[in-house]
Amino acid sequence: MPARSIATATISFGLVSIPTKLYTTNESSSDISFNMLHDADGARLKQQYVCTKCEQVVGRENTVKGYEYAKGQYVVLSGEELKALDAVATQTVALEEFVPAAAVDPLYVEKSYYLGPDKGGERAYKLLADAMLETGLVGVASYSARGKQYIVCLRPFQNGLIMHQLRYGNEVKQWAEVPMPELPEIKPAELGLAKQIIQQIAAETFHAEKYKDEVQVRMMDLIQKKVEGQEITAAPEAPAGKVIDLMEALKASLGMAKTEERKPAIAAAAEAKEEPKKKTATKKK
């Protein structure tokens, strides 16, 4: 089933305007959720709004929205005034600069949206995607929507574009705030063994589909047992791991995850470089 767009946006690229449609990158959530019930009769509970002044239960039809401009003091906004605030949003993705793709650390990414071309923007859309792909650069832009201005990053993805909503600099905690003791020097032998362990479980590409939420599967199994009238008991806690010598742990780790089909990433990269050389040698012969 084709994805349904959730919004529209116009990419501003110099004097070029590219109409696009936004699509969510998330699948519908399959998280396990629990409802609050009345312990006396098992009926589901519902939330209510209670006035902090008169302590009366207030229906949704009797609520208004207000902004607290001082402690305990609010300015009330009507529905039309709230619409006027939303009208500030331009729905324009104004590209302000292009930077190397590696310059945008994943730490700053908050959400992602697929961008598809809207009617009439196909050629300019592909031109921008191809230009960024050729240069290795990604676009940084401002984007106003839903009463807020966002900073976003546009980059080529598959045969189109993807847009990442980024955090502002003041929304990211600085690494310097993390307590960090003085770290010891690493011995060459330890580093060599650690690299071997990494390589024995290294892969050339990442495939998200091979990872499953095993915790959720176990939770559903336990819930099903409860539905069938069985009692749920907690599994005994695993014994705490013993602190052993680092070199012993590294040596014991070697060979734990060797598989014939898995090719070490460094070895694969080396083979890829050697392949053209082999072809050239064959031609010379």
Image (spheres, rainbow, N blue to C red):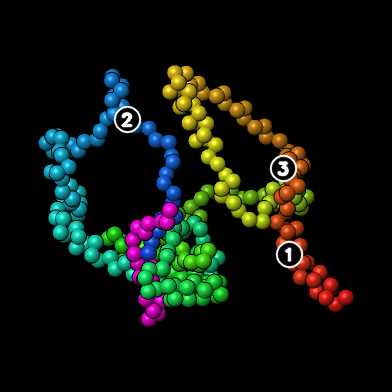
Q: Magenta-highlighted stretch: main secondary structure?
A: strand
Q: Secondary structure at mark 2?
A: loop
Q: Residue 8: tell me if it is visible.
A: yes
Q: Amino acid at mark 2?
A: Met
Residue drawn at x 41%, y 68% as measured from the top left: 117
- Where residue 148 appears, as percent x and y from the top left, is 30, 61
Of pointers 3 and 1, the one earlier in the residue sequence: 3
- List x then y, in percent, for residue 33: 39, 35
Q: CA distance from mark 2 to mark 1?
A: 57 Å
| Residue with the mark numbered 2 | 36
Task: Classify mark 1: residues with Cα within 10 Å, few (<14), some (14-19) or many (20+).
Answer: few
Q: Residue at x 50, y 28 (%)?
A: 221
> On the image, which quarter does residue 88 sit in?
bottom left
Q: Is residue 190 left or right of residue 48?
A: right
Which x, y percent locates residue 203? 67, 53
**280 to 162, vertically: above or below:** below
The picture places residue 108, in percent across and down from the top left corner, at: 46, 59
> Which residue type carries mark 1?
Ala
Q: Quadrant of the C terminus?
A: bottom right
Q: Which mark is residue 272?
A: 1
Callout 3: SS: loop
Residue on which the image places disc 3:
257
81 on left or right of 91: left
Which residue occupies the extreme right position in the image? Answer: 285
Which residue is situated farthest in the bottom direction here? Answer: 15
Q: Is residue 207 above or below residue 272?
A: above
9 within the magenta span: yes
Disc nearest the viewer among 2 and 1: 1
**Is 121 displayed left or right of 105 in the figure?**
left
Query: Which span of residues is magenta-colored?
Result: 1-20
Magenta highlight on residue 167: no
